[in-house]
Amino acid sequence: MNELLIISPGRLARATLGFVAACVLAACASNPATGGRDLVFMSEKDEIELGRQLHPQIMSGYTEYKDPQLQEYIKNIGERLAKNSHRPNLEYTFTLLDSEEVNAFAIPGGFIYITRGILTYLNSEAELAAVLGHEIAHVTARHSVRQNTGQKIGETLGQVASVLAGTSLAGDAAGVVSSALTSGYGRGMELEADELGAQYLAKSGYPHTAMIDVVRLLKDQEHFEILKAHDEGRPPRVYHGVFASHPDQDTRLQEVVEAAAELQSSEQADDNRYEFLSYMDGIPFGKKVSSGPVTVRGSEVYNHSLGIAITLPRGWRVQSFPDRLIAKSRYNDGTITMSIQGASKSYTPQEFIEQRLRITNMREGEDLTHGPPAHTGIVPRAASPYGLADTRLAVVYFGRRAFIFSNSAADKANPQKYDPEFFETLNSLRKLSAEENERSLQSAIRLTQVSPGMTVESLAKNSSIRRYPEETIRLINGLYPDKEPVPGDLVKTVE
């Protein structure tokens, strides 16, 4: 005859704990980044599959930032770091999100995300690499997987606690256990990510100290965000990786980052500040604002009244006037100008140059066959910002208007030095899309070379920042709380 088996709560608890212990022993695995033993219930294959499932869900709540060159730039930096990580064979995906949030994060399987919001607070490629390195380290050290394991153990221990206590307090006890294992990544894992990230920086040829620099500037941003959120009556939005204490007083952080110095690549460590800043020129900042008839966002020019847009060479400084547009090269040795007149149905672009502009000595003239009707050639000894010089001229018929472009260079021996950039500009002339129009209605980062006497106060007065302009200018340039810009340097402002 079968007998009813009755198990006391104590025996059930001991049996369950024994089962958990057996699972823990079976799930111990060597951590690929630290070499230590981890409690994990997920294989690498399952980890990768989880990431693939989560990625579409994340992207359903975000929009990818539409700048292929910047996306590629970030991807190349990320892959450079990943090759020098503890899991170089993992397939990583780097995505720039069109969000004003100051954030970066990673999910299992090598999916790394960074927002345009956090980019605006960085000031060098090395600092960007530090953020990416920190997030790559979360993946290589399997922090999400370890967190997932902690949640599962917490759930099981919660069931044990329920049997032992027999009261509603058991759920609270389980929550404490689970929270102790999985609350965020926690101080230990965040410190580990900074330590590993600093190693990846050093191995990749970046100064390992960039990790301290980026934690410092993000801590400053966090401090200001908390004050601002309090004034505005809302919760603060801060980057998850910043510690409670300031990095300058965090001895342990200083120690683990400095330990990466012995791994520094034999190549000269370079922060690539100016290349990074060239990508920041024109990137949207903050929320949408109203705009005038012409909006300049870095190298992009949007004429709302005419419904057209053009792209000027990246890194060139742009000035917009009522009757013309002027772009100057990074070293002030090249200029592209654009003006507009009504097109004439009775003239071809070449005849427009001869009859309307009264230029009859142009040489090397040719029609441009790709795109709208256009004609170009060289005007000898034309007036330019560099004196009399051979100048490239072009007239493009677009809609009912004639767009007149000219290009000159300071180099008398090579007056057509910037012809490639000039033709790229011509070919970029297009109808303003709804997406471009929407994007242009935002304030944007602009680069300014500091002249003698220029201060944060003067930069703030000329910016479009409505609230806390001086504090914001300091934060985005690493000058918080009371530093001033150095003459000759490039700084970011907001227009």
Image (tube, rainbow, N blue to C red):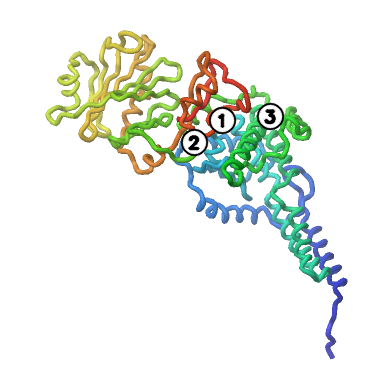
Seen at 42% across and 31% down, the residue is 297
- Determine which of the numbered discs, if any, sits on residue 137 in the image: none
- Res 392 seen here: yes
How far separated are the C-alphas under marks 1 and 3?
Answer: 21 Å
Name the amino acid type tagged 2.
Phe
Q: Nearer the viewer, residue 176 or 410?
A: 176
Residue 406 lies in quadrant: top left
How far separated are the C-alphas under marks 2 and 1?
Answer: 10 Å
**Is 159 placed left or right of 265 in the picture?**
right
User: Would you name the residue on which mark 1 appears?
Assistant: 476
Q: Nearer the viewer, mark 3 or mark 2?
A: 2
Q: Residues within 10 Å of mark 1 (few under 14, many from 20)?
A: many
User: Would you name the residue on which mark 3 appears?
Assistant: 208
Tell me which label, 3 or 2, sits earlier in the chain.
3
Residue 162 lies in quadrant: bottom right
Tag 2 near tag 1, CB within 8 Å: yes
Seen at 69% across and 52% down, the residue is 145
